[in-house]
Image (tube, rainbow, N blue to C red):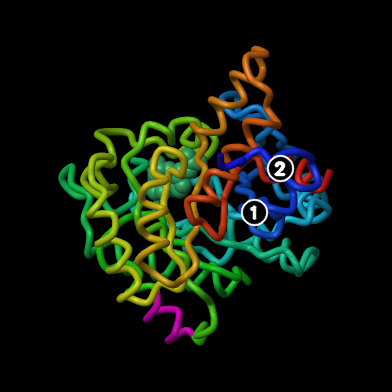
Amino acid sequence: MRRFRRLRASEEIRSLVQETRLSAKELIYPVFVKEGENIKAPVDSMPGIYQWSLDRFDEELDRISASGIAGLLIFGIPEHKDELATEAYSETGITQRAIRHIKEKYPRLLVIADVCLCEYTSHGHCGVVCCGEILNDDTLPLLAKMAVSLADAGADIIAPSDMMDGRVAAIRAALDSAGHINTPILSYSAKFASGYYSPFRDAAQSAPAFGDRRTYQMSVTNGREALREIADDIDEGADMVMVKPALAYLDIVRAARDRFGLPIAAYNVSGEYSMVKAAAANGWIDEKRIVLENLIAIKRAGADIIITYHALDAAEWINE
Ligand code: PBG
Ligand code: ZN
């Protein structure tokens, strides 16, 4: 008889043969910075997550920097939104100011800047809209301008999440000609048109005013296409690629890991977080166990980097 139980007999031996380990150093925490003053506004659908104004943001940054995680993914919520997302690429935009502040006070935190227009457009779409259509090629220069302006502000990594075709090449060219040849691109390559984003749209105030995002984000049915999206972003110059959401798409994470050599990130998105928090608040599940099990599953599927709203709690639990 094969006795698998020999290697399960004690905590010590189980730990010795543990195949997958989590480290705080591979976790990234998303944050929401909002224009205005004295704001620490809870996001109702995401318990524990807040929108912060810059004057109160240090409270959150202190926690992040003490946690030992790798860094943060920053989303800005401007006061002024318009058709062309002007605040997305303004030198004095909320995100640009927040990045300058972080890099000044917490230089060792990695700052990943999300590049997308939806928080800054009056219609909430990720690209330029004309006659009810989301225009691909007209959006690219704006994304490129936004990326350069975020890199100018000090962002360590540029992360385009818009899903326009050709944006990685456009952003790479713009970064290079602005002198940011060493700023890496983490592309949201396989981003699905998912129902799991709805709590985020409350947090970032970025829900589309008409229609949905299915003409640019991927169909949840398509695994092979996801690999073509990833391959294309690599060709265009992505340094790292992302699969998003994470838990319902672990097959894509695994397939990407087996096929490509570069670092792969998985985004454990807002809806995945909210479901765990809601069940835990009802006493139906053990939050710590479930969170660590989910993160291990993402890691086991092949992710090198995990973006998660659980990052600060998880970092504490990992180090216990
Ligand atoms: C913006 C963006 C979204 C998310 C990250 N960047 C929302 C969307 O595409 O509607 C979702 C993150 C989450 O749900 O946690 N393009
Ligand atoms: Zn967007």
The quadrant in which the N terminus is found is: top right
Mark 1 Cβ and ligand 1 under 8 Å apart: no
Mark closest to the chain's N terminus, 2 or 1: 1
The quadrant in which the C terminus is found is: top right
Residue 121 position, x and y percent, is 39, 47
Mark 2 Cβ and ligand 1 under 8 Å apart: no
- Quadrant of residue 304 in the image? bottom right
Farthest residue toward the front? Answer: 1
* Image: 154 above or below 200: below
Amino acid tagged 2: Ala
Residue 246 position, x and y percent, is 46, 44
Looking at the rendering, the stretch of residues picked out in magenta corresponds to: 172-178
Residue drawn 31% across the image and 53% down it: 127
Residue 260 position, x and y percent, is 38, 69
* Image: 279 above or below 154: above
Residue ID for mark 2: 314
Drawn side of residue 270 relative to residue 21, left or right? left
Mark 2 element type? helix
Quarter of the rendered image showing ligand 1: top left
Between 133 and 155, the residue placed more toward the observer is: 155
Residue ID for mark 1: 27
* Image: 124 above or below 48: below
Residue 27 position, x and y percent, is 64, 54
Main SS, magenta residues: helix
**Was residue 193 drawn as part of the magenta stretch in this picture?**
no
Category of crowding for the residue at label 1, using alpha-carbon neighbours closer than 10 angstroms: few (below 14), some (14–19), many (at least 20): many
Residue drawn 67% across the image and 13% down it: 283
